[in-house]
C-alpha cells in the first residue's frame, strides 16, 4: 500500500484518538450536605466546588468552598466570603434530630445560616464528623 495513502487514511483517526486521550473531563462536584429551611424558603448546597445559597424567588449566590471548622461543641462551622463587599456566609450544622416545619421530614442535623444581618434556622441532610470523631 502507498505510504502517503496510508498516512492520509490514518491521520484523522490518530488525531481524534489523541484529542480524546488528552481531554480530561472535569469531575462532577460532590454534594456533601444540603441545609434548608422554611419561611422563608432557603437552601445551601455545600459541594466540593463551592457553596450555593438559594432563596425562593431570588437568584442563587455562589461562595467558595472552605472546609468546616469545628467549635468546642463539635458543630461544623462553614465560613465563606465571595468578594470584599459581599456579606460573610456562615453555616453551622450540629448533630441533632430536626424536622422541617412543612413536610415533617426528618434530618440528622440542625442548621443555622447567617448571611450579613440575616439569620435563618433549618435542617441539614448530612452532619460532618467532628475532629474528635476522626
Image (spheres, helix red, strand yellow):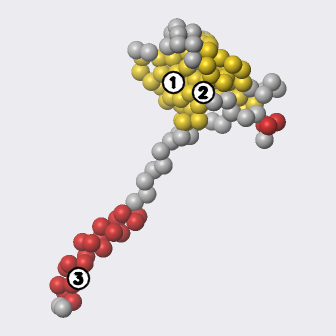
Q: Quadrant of residue 24?
A: bottom left
| Residues at circles 2 and 3 in contact by the CB criterion of under 8 Å | no
Real-space Cα distance between discs 2 and 1? 15 Å
Real-space Cα distance between discs 2 and 3? 57 Å
The residue that mark 3 highlights is 7
Q: Is residue 71 left or right of residue 86?
A: right
Q: Quadrant of residue 99?
A: top right
Residue 40 or 107: which is nearer the viewer? 107
Q: Is residue 9 above or below residue 57?
A: below
The residue that mark 1 highlights is 53
Q: Is residue 74 above or below residue 11?
A: above
Q: Position of residue 129 (x, y in %)?
A: 73, 35
Q: Quadrant of residue 72?
A: top right
Q: Which comes before the other along the chain, label 3 or label 1?
A: 3
Residue 27 visible, this angle: yes
Q: Is residue 104 above or below residue 26?
A: above
Q: Which numbered circle lies on residue 125?
A: 2
Q: The C terminus is located in which quarter?
A: top right
Q: Is residue 20 left or right of residue 33?
A: left
SS class, disc 3: helix
Residue 80 or 132: which is nearer the viewer? 132
Q: Is residue 114 left or right of residue 57?
A: right
Q: Is residue 47 above or below residue 1?
A: above
Q: Which comes before the other along the chain, label 2 or label 3?
A: 3
Front of the two marks 2 and 1:
2
Q: Position of residue 122 (x, y in %)?
A: 60, 16
Q: Position of residue 131 (x, y in %)?
A: 78, 37
SS class, disc 1: strand
| Residues at circles 2 and 1 in contact by the CB criterion of under 8 Å | no
Q: Position of residue 118 (x, y in %)?
A: 59, 11
Q: Which numbered circle lies on residue 43?
A: none
At x 50%, y 13%, the residue is 41
Amino acid at each position: 500500500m502507498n505510504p502517503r495513502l496510508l498516512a492520509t487514511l490514518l491521520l484523522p483517526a490518530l488525531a481524534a484518538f489523541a484529542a480524546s486521550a488528552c481531554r480530561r473531563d472535569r469531575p462532577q462536584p460532590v454534594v456533601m450536605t444540603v441545609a434548608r429551611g422554611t419561611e422563608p424558603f432557603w437552601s445551601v448546597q455545600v459541594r466540593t466546588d463551592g457553596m450555593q445559597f438559594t432563596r425562593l424567588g431570588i437568584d442563587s449566590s455562589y461562595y467558595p468552598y472552605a472546609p468546616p471548622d469545628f467549635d468546642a461543641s463539635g458543630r461544623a462551622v462553614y465560613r465563606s466570603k465571595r468578594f470584599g463587599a459581599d456579606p460573610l456566609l456562615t453555616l453551622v450544622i450540629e448533630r441533632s434530630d430536626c424536622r422541617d416545619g412543612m413536610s415533617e421530614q426528618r434530618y440528622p442535623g440542625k442548621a443555622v445560616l447567617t448571611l450579613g444581618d440575616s439569620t435563618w434556622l433549618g435542617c441539614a441532610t448530612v452532619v460532618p464528623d467532628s475532629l474528635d470523631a476522626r
